[in-house]
Amino acid sequence: MTISHAKAQALMDSLREVMWQGAAARRRMEEPIPGIPHHIVSFLVVIHRADGIRQGDLAEALQIDASVASRHVAVLLEQQLITRDVDPRDRRAYMLRVTDVGVEALAALRERQTHWLRDVLADWDDTRASAAATALAELAERMTEAAHALPRATSTTEGPAE
């Protein structure tokens, strides 16, 4: 069983619009975390999800140049949202970890985003929201697997997509 070309295009168009409008909403909102530009928040999220990550692995996860990662990590360190500690498995390397301040900032951001989405979907019931969440989770899993199977681009100097 496979979906038609037209349905795949319609789904891709809808996904593109959701991502575009989500990014537009994030840009219109106040700074997500005081002192941290919108485009750097994704760094904090990746570090938190990884529960500690080397800077090179962070750059690879975000598909950006190491120098870009270094500049943005410096901002997070300056704001005391992350720490850089010696990796106990390899004393030559460093691990980035989110501080308690960073965890609190991410929790506050998630709460604001959740309230916003509840307002957007005020006319939906839990059944409809659950169906959408299930479909999106499955789609995200399949897209993640497919994305990891793609060959790497040779140049990744841009920051992560909003």
Image: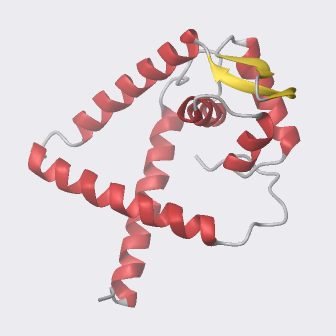
**Residue at 62%, 31% in the rendered image:** 47
Residue at the far front: name it: 89
**Residue at 82%, 39% in the rendered image:** 68
Residue 142 at x, y = what percent?
44, 66
Residue 107 at x, y = what percent?
43, 20
Say if 19 sits above or below 45 in the image: below
Residue 82 at x, y = what percent?
67, 18
Please state which of residues 41 and 26 is positioned toward the viewer in this rendering: 41
Say if 101 sits above or below 113 in the image: above
Please state which of residues 115 and 82 is positioned toward the viewer in this rendering: 82
Residue 38 at x, y = what percent?
60, 32
Q: Tell whether 48 sits left or right of 75.
A: left
**Residue at 58%, 29% in the rendered image:** 51
- Total marks drawn? 0
Please state which of residues 46 and 17 is positioned toward the viewer in this rendering: 46
**Residue at 74%, 17% in the rendered image:** 77
Q: Tell whether 39 sits left or right of 30.
A: right
